[in-house]
Amino acid sequence: GQLIRRVELPLAFPLVMTGVRTAAVQVVATATLAALPGGGGLGRIITAGFRLTDTPQVVAGAVLVAALALVVEGVFVVLGWVLDPMRRRTGRRAAARLPADQAPQSPALTA
């Protein structure tokens, strides 16, 4: 159990978050298809543009869907960065465990 919790899951976390991020973007992108049978949503803008043969409206709807997908992608990137267990293991705690002569120096102090 400790091997999985302390080694396997922290190493697998970036790959798992990539899958979750990809799935979330796919859900946003395919949710526009709900407008085809009359389900509504953001796809209504696109389908109304097709019905009216209004190309700018279709493009505007597609741009909105793409922007929403990019926002969802960005949220999941930040979430993955904040929750990454490997990122928490490095940094101040690792530097505090090093002896003073082996502690990392900032480039400004070494010059």
Image: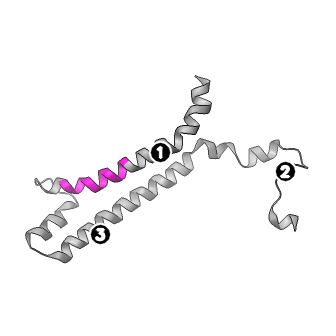
Amino acid type, residue under disc 1 in the picture: Met
Total marks placed: 3
Q: Secondary structure at mark 1?
A: helix
Mark 3 / mark 1, whichever is N-terminal: 1
Task: Quote the CA–CA distance across marks 3 and 1.
Answer: 25 Å
Residue, disc 3:
63
Is 72 one of the magenta-colored residues?
A: no
According to the picture, the residue beneath numbered tag 1 turns out to be 17
Count residues near mark 1 (Cα–Cα under 10 Å), then give few for <14, some for 14-19, many for 20+.
Answer: some
**Which contiguous range is marked in magenta?**
23-33
Residue occupied by mark 2: 103
Contact between marks 3 and 1 (CB within 8 A): the answer is: no
- What is the x, y in percent for residue 66? 32, 64
Quadrant including the C terminus: bottom right
**Measured from the top left, where is residue 18 in percent x and y?**
46, 47
Determine the image quadrant of residue 72: bottom left
Residue at horizontal 79 percent and vertical 47 percent from the top: 95
